[in-house]
Image: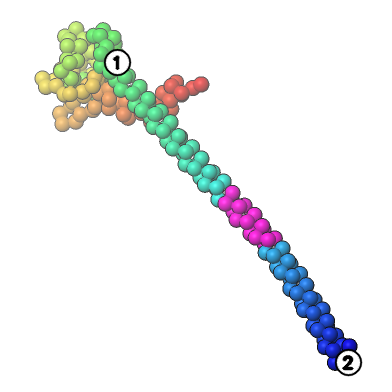
Amino acid sequence: MSGAEKLKEKIIAEAEAQAERVLQEARQRATEIIARGEKEGTARRETLLAQARDQAEEKKRRALTIAELDARKQILAAKEELIEDTFNQALTRLHELERKPYQELLFPMILAAVQRGDEELIVSPSQREHFDAPFLVRLNETLRQQGKKGQLTLAAGTRPLQGGFVLRAGEVEINNSFDSLLRMQRDLLEPTVAGMLFTE
């Protein structure tokens, strides 16, 4: 083999070795890049999954909070409806009292409302019969004993009241109808009614 051929083979061998080293380095770098990419991809995937889990938890918490608020609103509305119904039933029962218990209920109320003793009582058409002559006589006798005129009368006209009465002295009227009295006392009565209805 001549020197030129040996030199040529040596150059080819060195070139092949150099090419193999470059190829090996390229493979090494490619493997490192792929591994780094996989690692970064895994990390990114874990980050995205964690974010998605956090967002899902937050949405779940919000949905539960909204559901709890809705449930509270519905319970409150149901309670308010029951309280309203209780007040309406109370009015109905007062309105439907028989003559004697009705008179006994109104007697002290009328005495407390009368100022002079010559006022007029305005009542509902359905309760007018409860204000009979003996009842008015008893009222006026008691008013005279209290030092008042004792000339209380039943007004000719009536009003659509839900029980009770309106006391009129000239142009001045005092509304003592049951619905008016309950309305005025409702803020005070409502906690007691709620306590009776909703105590466990």
Tell me, yes or no, whether the highlighted magenta stretch contains residue 49: yes
User: For mark 1, does the 10 Å Cα neighbourhood hold few (<14), some (14 to 19), or many (20 or more) residues?
Assistant: few
Tell me, yes or no, whether the highlighted magenta stretch contains residue 145: no
Quadrant of the rendered image containing residue 17: bottom right
The residue positioned 40% from the left and 28% from the top of the image is 79
Q: Is residue 106 above or below residue 42?
A: above
Residue 3: mark in rendering: 2
Amino acid bearing label 2: Gly
Residue 80: where, in percent of width, then height?
38, 29
User: Over which residues does the magenta segment extend?
Assistant: 38-53
The residue positioned 23% from the left and 21% from the top of the image is 162
> Magenta-highlighted stretch: main secondary structure?
helix
Amino acid bearing label 1: Arg
Residue 163: where, in percent of width, then height?
24, 19
Quadrant of the rendered image containing residue 108: top left
The nearer-to-camera label among 1 and 2 is: 2
The furthest residue to the front = 1
Residues 62 and 86: in front is 62
Quadrant of the rendered image containing residue 2: bottom right
Residues 117 and 199: in front is 199
Q: Is residue 144 above or below residue 191?
A: above
- Secondary structure beneath dot 2 equals helix
- Secondary structure beneath dot 1 equals helix
Residues 63 and 200: in front is 63
Residue 95: where, in percent of width, then height?
25, 16
> In this rendering, does residue 4 appear at all?
yes
Q: State the separation of the CA atoms marked 1 and 2.
A: 132 Å
Question: Which residue is denoted by mark 1 in the rendering?
Answer: 93
Instruction: Name which of mark 1 and mark 2 comes first in the sequence.
Output: 2
> In this rendering, does residue 192 appear at all?
no
State yes or no: discs 1 and 2 in contact (Cβ < 8 Å): no
Q: Report whether 142 appears left or right of 185.
A: left
